[in-house]
Each structure stands twice: as structure tokens, then as C-alpha cells.
Image (spheres, coloured by chain):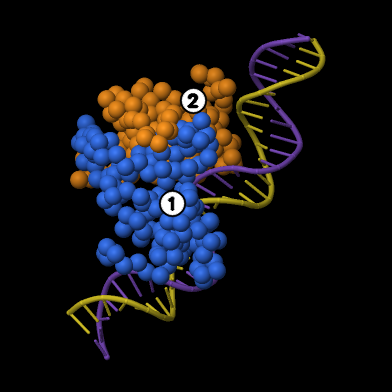
Chain colours: A blue, B orange, C purple, D yellow
Amino acid sequence: MAQAQTLSRNQQIVLDIIEKAKGPLKAYSILFNVQKKGINAPQQIYRALDKLIEMGKIHKIESKNAFVACRSSDCEISKATAFSICESCEMVDEISDTKLSKYISSFNHKKGMKFKRFNLEFFGLCKKCK
Amino acid sequence: MAQAQTLSRNQQIVLDIIEKAKGPLKAYSILFNVQKKGINAPQQIYRALDKLIEMGKIHKIESKNAFVACRSSDCEISKATAFSICESCEMVDEISDTKLSKYISSFNHKKGMKFKRFNLEFFGLCKKCK
DNA sequence: TAACAAACGTTATATTATAACAATGATAAA
DNA sequence: TTTATCATTGTTATAATATAACGTTTGTTA
């Protein structure tokens, strides 16, 4: 089990870059950014990303194959994630709305499936791009 | 503009396979399935997939990079899609729930973004796999 | 300190997706 | 009917995303 707090060297490097970024980052763009720090292979990036996701430090934006830092306290280890995505400028914003999150979490599928987690992605144009 | 009804040859071939499938299909698995019909290149599959998505005939399951036929009348050209995904057997079910869909569609982001579309993916264990 | 697990580095390769270009077919306006 | 236009096709090549497999190192804890 990943410990709640301690990050390994590579995990910290990758997290730092994602946290500093203004928007979502792709794995290979992270890779290019850390080559000066001695990380040379995609595998190293993907391993760090996997762990950071497990810990809830970052999220993957599935529709973009890109990664953002978690800015929410709501989503507790990514059980309930929601994002707004601008189709023009590619901006991604994490949505932290307790009501929305609770409503969706409480949804029960007729077919008897018990949900552990959901991910919601909204698409549109942000304020700037409208 | 794609016409509402008429599908081209390749589009029809690809749609047929997706509709017959029990679960989500990946682009390259579609490709292997249609090589006997004279379709040889990924580009041909992806082009058909793109058009079928535009027409609302199929949906992409973003977390799986796979494609399913649309079974819902609710989602009118994929403005409001929701799926339940079994993490064990990979089964995907389109959720067609007007209340859920309306609730989410009416959500307004504080930061002034106007949404055109959303995609929601639930994860868990299906009845069988529980 | 021995044993084990997690993280690391590395090479290779698998999987998913798009670029670019020429040819063909379908539609409809002149 | 001819010509213009636009969607679709076929094809080759390549880009972008992600994982397999192996051995080594580091960190924890019994």
C-alpha cells in the first residue's frame, strides 16, 4: 500500500511539474520536462503517474489522456471526480460541488450494479473562449 | 454535414460489427474483424468511427478507448452520455436515465462555463462479478 | 542482518491514433 | 450534360500513448 504522505523521488518530481502546470499535462510532455533531472524513460513517468493517481494526488482526464493535480478535498482518493473542459483552449477545471457529487454517487443502476467510483467530464467553452 | 440516415459502405460495416458485439470493441479489434471485407488500414476504421460518433450511432468509452453502439434515445447525438463499467468483466452498459441526465445537464459551473455536453462513467462490479 | 516489498533504470515492444496524398464516387448547380 | 464541389476511399508512413520484462537498488521491518 502506498503510504498516505511520503512520495518517492520520481513521484515528487512528477507531481511538482503537474502542480506547477496551468493546464493538463500529457505523459510525454512530462517526460521531456524531467529529462534534465535524470528521468529518461516513459515507464518511469507512467509508474509515478499510477501511484499518484492511487494516492489521489492527481487525476487523469480520460478524454484527453492528460493529467491534472487534484485541487479538491471532495473527491477523496478519486471516488467522485468531475471536470469542466474547454473545447477551444483545452483548459480543465476540477469541479468540486458536494451536491452534484452526492447526487451522482447516490445513483443506483437498475441492473444491480454497485458503483465504487465515477468520473464526469463536461465539455463546452470557457468564459474566455465564449 | 453527415446526413441523418445514410451510411457509407465502411461506416455500415463498422457499425454492424459494433452493434453485434456483446461488449465494447477496440479500434484494432474491429480492424482485424473486417480485413476479410477488404478494409486494411486503421485510418479506415478511425474515419468510420469518427463519423458514427458524430451521428450518435456509437459512443466512445473514454476510459477504455473502446466503442459501443448507442442503445439510448435519450442521449440525442451524444450530448448526455452515461455508462456503467464493470471493472472485472469489462462489461459496459449505457445508462439511460432521464432524471439523472436532466440533473447533470442543468448543472451550472460557477466559473461561467456553458456546457454543451457531458460524459459520465461509473465503475464498479456488475451483478455477475459481485 | 536477513527477508521482503517498493521503487528504480533500462531496453524493447505493444497499442492507439493521425498525417498526407492521390483516386473515386455522389450531388447538385450551371 | 458537364463541371464544380465535397464526402468517402485506399494507401503508406509515422506519431503518440502505454506496457512488458528484466535486473538492480533502496527502504522497512521482523
Whether A35 is drawn above or below B2: the answer is below
Q: Amino acid at mark 2?
A: Met
Density class for disc 2 (Cα within 10 Å; few <14, some 14-19, many ≥20) is some
Q: Determine contact: label 1, label 2, CB under 8 Å.
A: no
Density class for disc 1 (Cα within 10 Å; few <14, some 14-19, many ≥20) is many
Q: Secondary structure at mark 1?
A: strand
Whether A98 is drawn above or below D18: the answer is above
Q: Amino acid at mark 1?
A: Phe
Name the residue tied to disc 1.
A67
Measuring from the top left, give residue A32's x and y in whole percent: 55, 61
Q: Are marks 1 and 2 on the same chain?
A: no
- When asked about the image quadrant of residue B98, the answer is top left
Q: CA distance from mark 1 to mark 2?
A: 29 Å
Most foreground residue, B16 or B36: B16
Residue drawn at (38%, 41%) of the image: A83
Most foreground residue, A107 or A68: A68
Measuring from the top left, give residue D19's x and y in whole percent: 43, 58
Chain of the residue displaying label 2: B
Q: Secondary structure at mark 2?
A: helix
Residue drawn at (39%, 53%) of the image: A69
Measuring from the top left, give residue C29's x and y in whole percent: 72, 10
Name the residue tied to disc 2.
B55
On the question of residue A27 being in view, the answer is: yes
- Nearer to us of marks 1 and 2 is 1
